[in-house]
Image (tube, helix red, strand yellow):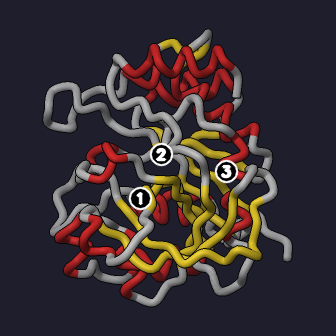
Amino acid sequence: MILNPLIIIPSQLNEKDGTNNGKPLRQLRDVNGASMVVQSYRRVKESKIGSVIVDCLGDEIAEELGREGAYTVRTDPEELLKNHNYRTESGAERLAATVNRFDRFYTHDIVINVHEDMPALEPKYIRALMYALASDDVGIATMVCPLTNKDLDDRSIVKTRVSWNEQRRVYVLKGSKVGTVDDFSREPDRLGAGPHYRHIPIYAYRRAQLDRFVDSPPSERELEEKIEALRALEKGFRIDVCLVDAAPFKVTRDQDLETARELLDTGL
C-alpha cells in the first residue's frame, strides 16, 4: 500500500493578554540558533515521510519560515477566532479547511497534524504513526505513553484505555507496539480497569475520514470533556495508537524555551 502523507503544522496565537488575541511572538524566540517554529519545522522535515506545510496566521511567522525554505499557507485570524456553538481542542476543522484549500484534488491521502510548540520532537515519533495506519480499517492514528502518578489527577491530560495487538510492532521505536483505542477520558475512573495511558495529541488522519469527521456534529461527551477524539469513537471510527516512552516536550510558556534548548543540546 502506497501512502502519500501531508504534514500540516498550524501556527497558533499566543494568549499574551488572556484573550487569545495576542501576537504570535513566542514562535520567533531563539532555540539554539533558530526560532522555535523553525526548529519544530526541521524536526518534522527530518521524519522524511511526506510533504510539509505550515499554516500561518501572520506575516512574521510566514516570512521566518520562508527564509528556511518552508511552504506556507495563510489562515485569516479573524475567521479562526469567530465564535461558534462549540470549540474543539485539536482543531480538526481548521486542519480540514487547510488541506482542502491546499490540495483540492486529493493528491495526499494521509493528513498529519503536528504542533509548532515541539521544537525537540524526535522525528521517529512521526514515522511511528505510519505503523498505526498500516491496517485499512484504521481511520485515525495517534500515540500514547505511560501515565505518571502526577498525570492521573491532571485534567489537562487526556487518558486512554487501549486494547494492544502484541503482534504489531513499531520497529522505529524500541519496545513499541500498536493497539486500538477503547475509550478516552480526563477522569481515569471513567475508563474502567487499567492500565491506562496518556494520550499525545499528534494525529494522522486518512483523508476521507477527516472529511467525515468534521462533517459530523459533536457528541455530548465530547462537549462535556472537551476531547475531540470522542466524537470519532462514537461515530464508529477506528483509532489505533503506537506506544512511545514519554510525551514530547511542549513549549507552553516562555520559561519552557530554556528546557527546549537543553533537550536539543543533548541531541535527538
Q: Please tell me the numbered disc located at residue 126.
A: 3
Q: Position of residue 268 (x, y in %)?
A: 70, 29
How packed is label 3: few (under 14 Cα within 10 Å), some, or many (20 or more)? many
Q: Position of residue 180 (x, y in %)?
A: 56, 77
Q: Secondary structure at mark 1?
A: helix
Of the image marks 2 and 1, the number of the one nearer the N terminus: 2
- Which mark's residue is nearer the viewer, 3 or 2? 3
Residue linked to disc 1: 94
The extreme right residue here reads 1
Q: Answer whether labels 3 and 2 touch (C-beta < 8 Å).
A: no
Residue 171 found in image quarter: bottom right
Report whether 241 appears left or right of 23: right
What amino acid is found at the position of numbered circle 2 in the picture?
Pro
Residue found 67% across the figure and 34% down from its top: 43
Question: How far apart, in angstroms, are the residues tagged by discs 2 and 1?
Answer: 8 Å
Residue 116 appears in the rendering: yes
How packed is label 1: few (under 14 Cα within 10 Å), some, or many (20 or more)? some
Of the image marks 3 and 1, the number of the one nearer the N terminus: 1
Residue linked to disc 2: 10
Report whether 168 appears left or right of 244: right
How packed is label 2: few (under 14 Cα within 10 Å), some, or many (20 or more)? many
Q: Is 64 drawn above or below residue 44 in the view shown? A: above
